[in-house]
Image (cartoon, rainbow, N blue to C red):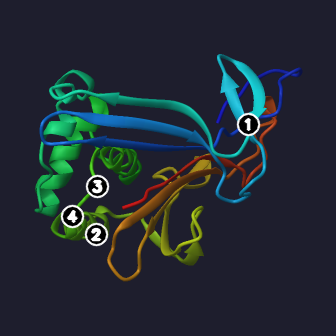
Amino acid sequence: MSMESGPDAAPPVTVPEERITHWNADGSGSELVVATDPRHPGRPVIHDNDGHWQTVSDGKVLHDKTYPAGSEARHSGLASRTRPSTDPAELREQLSWLYGGPDDTRTTGQLLTALSSFRQEWTPGPRETAAIVRMLADAGGLRPAGVVTDRLGRRGQAFVYDGPDGAANSTRQMVILDPRTGELLGLEVTFTKNQPDFRIRSGEVMSYEAWMP
């Protein structure tokens, strides 16, 4: 979400994109970014063109590049070359030093943020997915929010986290899992309080990610 503050601020804008990154064993790969909103197929999509808002056609390719063998080491960091642990406790520790920053993943909110970064670089296999489910079950603070339909139209089981400060927290994180396999389907962040300076109302979406296998 792009936001401006102040009395003359423009309304907040969420830019929907689909991003596919693939790396091969020899370090060759490809990156593809497409402007698309799965909720409204065929409709024009808002695009940020170097700070200037414009609409582009649904499915417009914004970035498409292929890389020769050996490129992965130059384009990816340590995280993408570190195989995830299949032990829940070890996986949380791994996510902490790879993505947690100075505050590591002490809170469940920080853990979910780290998990989002992890999912951008890895497609977990069955054993890794099982470790993620067990890790979330032990995280604390997550409460079931029932069955939902994600941004790609898939049926999922949602769990939400409101933060350690309860009513003082202004955002809510929601992680969506496949109810059959436990696979991570998506993560959304919504506002739980009005933010007048940014022309944001409670319930509006700050960001969302929907991951494909």
Q: Regarding mark 3 in the picture, which secondary structure is present there?
A: loop
Identify the residue position indicated by label 2 in the image.
133
Give left or right: position of 5 versus 173: right
Give left or right: position of 138 versus 53: left
Q: Residues within 10 Å of mark 4 (few under 14, many from 20)?
A: few
Q: Which amino acid does label 2 sit on?
A: Val
Q: Regarding mark 2 in the picture, which secondary structure is present there?
A: helix
Q: Residues within 10 Å of mark 3 (few under 14, many from 20)?
A: some
4 vs 2, front mark = 4
| Mark sitting earlier along the chain (4/2) | 4
What separation in Å lies between label 3 and label 1 (alpha carbons)? 28 Å
Quarter assignment of residue 79: top left
Tell me the residue at 39%/35% (across/down).
31
Q: Which amino acid does label 4 sit on?
A: Gly
Identify the residue position indicated by label 4 in the image.
125
Identify the residue position indicated by label 3 in the image.
123
